[in-house]
Amino acid sequence: MIPPEDRIEQRSCITGIGQSQIGRRLHRNPLDLTLEACLAAIEDAGLTTADIDGLSTYPGMQVGNPGFNGASATDVHDALRLELDWFDSGIETAGQLGSVIKACLAVGAGLANHVLCFRSVWEGSAQGSGGRGGIGSENGPGFRASGMLQWTLPFAAPSAAIWLALVANCHFHRYGTTREQLAQIALNGRRNAGLNPDAIYRTPMSMEDYFAARMISSPFCLFDCDVPCDGATAVVVSRRERARDLRRPPVRVEAVGTALRGRPSWDQFDDLAAMANRDAAAHMWTRTELKPADVDVAQLYDGFSFLALSWIEALGFCKVGEGGPFIEGGGRIAREGELPLNTHGGQLSAGRLHGYGFLHEAVVQLRGDGGERQVAGSPEVAVAAAGGGPTSGCLLLTR
């Protein structure tokens, strides 16, 4: 157990949250969406742009599939005329929420007082109405792949849907997990999205609907894959001493998890039925006296449905290999269940906001602002986790 005096993240808290308009294809300028979310988060905290002295985002200036990046840190820095003491815009981090974790460490170290963190996407508009492109598929003739892609692209495997299907199939084979069990992640998300006015897909979905959907990469069908959309999410991470007199009661950062002890690989991890979330989750629990049983709501990355199941096991809500039976029937992960999961609908139904949407929803639930989807009983502890494959990160939050 890490000594309390070494838990630097506990010197930070989340004081503001904001989201832009979210839609399947909004055809709005992506920087416009980004600034809408950023200004909303700053206003929610009761701050002004002059108070923001730190900036952090994911994935920086990376070039990816069309719409994967809505705006860079440089774009936001310049557009808001921020005067910064600290900033970060790198991609190599502990999953999508690694950018928030770094902000927690920055304010804990005294490098900044209020760090604006954001993530924006416009994949829905950028990729149009056709199929989604895989990694590397946007390159034309003469493209020469390197790294992992040099081994996967020649075999028509350009997508994480394929790479993670291998992990899911290993889990199915080793532990007896079934598609009927996995379907509960998607069905639960759709039920919750029906109560979220900002969700992309709110139409009720049945088990029959799930199995009638086309197969993407076995065992993943269409409804196991997240929904490309346009939108932005932002949060303000503040030093605890600077948060006491702000507009809303702060949400404390109790612990973070960032460890990566296996190989940094999609397909060469030491346990082919697990991923880096195994290490990040275990690391988080060494930085707090709280236990999995103390968690009231779980907002867990579901870029593909199996990722949420994997996070459930990694975080210790059930034993490794027992994720399928744990979610079977959907009762345990329902809003009224013992582990309310992805109460906004997750990325499978609410839209692929690439990790930040889970942190936003965790704060909404701890504040009691969920409206129709609010978990009863005034939740006090939430976990937000993002990432899959070789990178993952998680935060434990308290009210």
Image: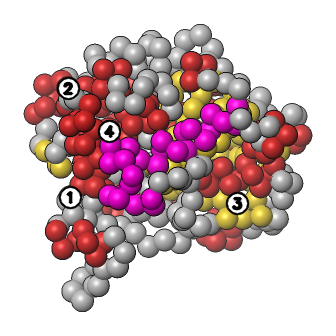
The magenta stretch is 263-288
Badge 1 crowding class, 10 Å Cα cut-off, few under 14, some 14 to 19, many 20 or more, is few
Q: Earlier in the sequence, mark 4 or mark 1?
A: 1
Q: Is mark 1 on a helix, strand or loop?
A: loop
| Residue hosting label 4 | 306
- Between 266 and 31, the one lying in front of the other is 266
Residue lying at 58% horizontally and 50% vertically, measured from the top left: 259
Residue at 40% x, 20% y is 333
Q: In this view, does 368 lie above or below 37?
A: above
Left or right placement of residue 49 versus residue 323 in this view: right
- Give the quarter of the figure containing the C terminus: top right
Q: Which residue is drawn at 26% across and 31% down?
A: 175
**Can residue 272 be found in the magenta stretch?**
yes
Asked if the magenta segment contains residue 71, the reply would be: no
**Label 2: few (<14), some or many (≥20) within 10 Å?**
some
* Residue 279 in sight: yes
Residue beneath label 3, please?
Answer: 55
Instruction: Give the residue type at disc 1.
Output: Gly
